[in-house]
Image: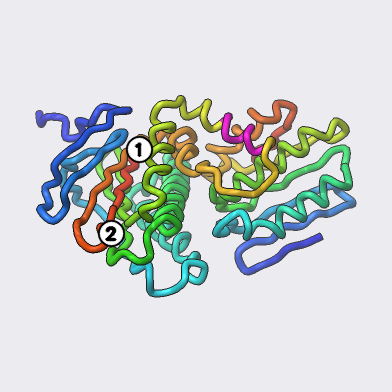
Amino acid sequence: MVSDPFKTTPARAVQQAESSCSEITVGQIFGEFLENLPESREYLLLVFSPSSLPLKKRWRTNGLSADFLADYLAVFFPGDEGNPETVGKQDQIQGTVSYIANELLENAMKFSDDGAPTSIRIELQLYLSKLVFLVTNSIKPNTIQSYQAFIQEVLASNPSEMLFRRLEQLAQDDTLKCSGLGLVTIMNDYSARLGWKFETIPGTPEVTIVTTMVQVNV
Amino acid sequence: MELKTEDYCVWYDTATQTLTCQGTLRLADLEEYTPIWQLLNEVISQKPNLLTLDLRRLKYLNSSGFNVLSRFVLKVRQEATMQLLVQASKQIAWQEKSLKNLQRVMPSLQFEIE
């Protein structure tokens, strides 16, 4: 019997950790972030170069990539023709991967720092009983604080109550603006566990990258 | 009233009081959803007594789209004379997982699931 490879950082914890990469100084962790993820035999990795086209012109690539990841992964859940429940499960997994990957990519594209010399990556790892999404992007320096405050609010709240509160706030505010609904929906409706790691790459200027980890049982 | 692109189609049939959304709605931000938001508001301004919202062939909806859909439901909730029936498909994962949130903000909302 092997030890539990998915032993997690305690939820709601915020801790400082030295990164294994010598170029990167400090990692700040929020939520359930697995530092030493066991190697997966099945995974996909897509890397995007964010500066090659304006965001609006490449927006479609988020959905296309999410659907590709989802359709690819669904192959590993073929279902049993004699058992309709397992066939439904394949559709559910396809839909779950597609939704989560699209939301994570949309966020990564929106919040990444176009001036930073780093690419955006999405990695999907398949394990026996769970899926792990890892999305890495740079983040604009002036948005780091508000993003971390949002993360702390998410981690301190009951996801169901936070989602309901967010939806009710929409009724009070008739201006159409960003709401942070995506991550709360992933937590609440897809029963996912979320974690974040912020790292700083020294240089001029200094670049901060964030890796978002989403774990879903399958 | 109809909005049609290669990704989605949204239209309202006054005779049947049915608003239908089909395809994929993953627009970049709420500003891009403005034409759809305007169409939804026009539907509310007609105050149909029983409005049917047919989502059965809306395969994907991102969180910005769900934001718009929730605002729409909240506006219908404010109209005392309007009832809302949502037609959904349990084959489509986001509908199966997220539509229950709309009932939470509008408990009188009825569902017809196929």
Look at label 2 and name its amino acid.
Leu
Q: Position of residue B49 (x, y in %)?
A: 88, 38
Residue A22 visible? The answer is: yes
Q: Is residue A32 left or right of residue A37?
A: right
Q: Quadrant of residue A89?
A: top left
Look at label 1 and name its amino acid.
Leu
Q: Which residue is mark 2?
A: A45
Magenta stretch, overall SS: helix
Quadrant assignment for the C terminus of chain A: top left
Above or below residue A81? Residue A1 is above
In this view, the mark in front (1 or 2): 1
Q: Position of residue A214 (x, y in %)?
A: 34, 42
Quadrant assignment for the N terminus of chain A: top left
Q: Which residue is mark 1?
A: A194
Q: Residue visible at 64% across and 52% down?
A: B57
The part of the chain drawn in magenta is A164-170
Q: Position of residue A138 (x, y in %)?
A: 32, 56
> In this view of the protein, which residue sits in the foreground, A53 or B91?
A53
Give the CA separation, mark 1 to mark 2.
19 Å
Q: How is colour applied across the structure in the image? A: rainbow
Q: Earlier in the sequence, mark 1 or mark 2?
A: 2
Q: State the SS at label 1.
A: strand
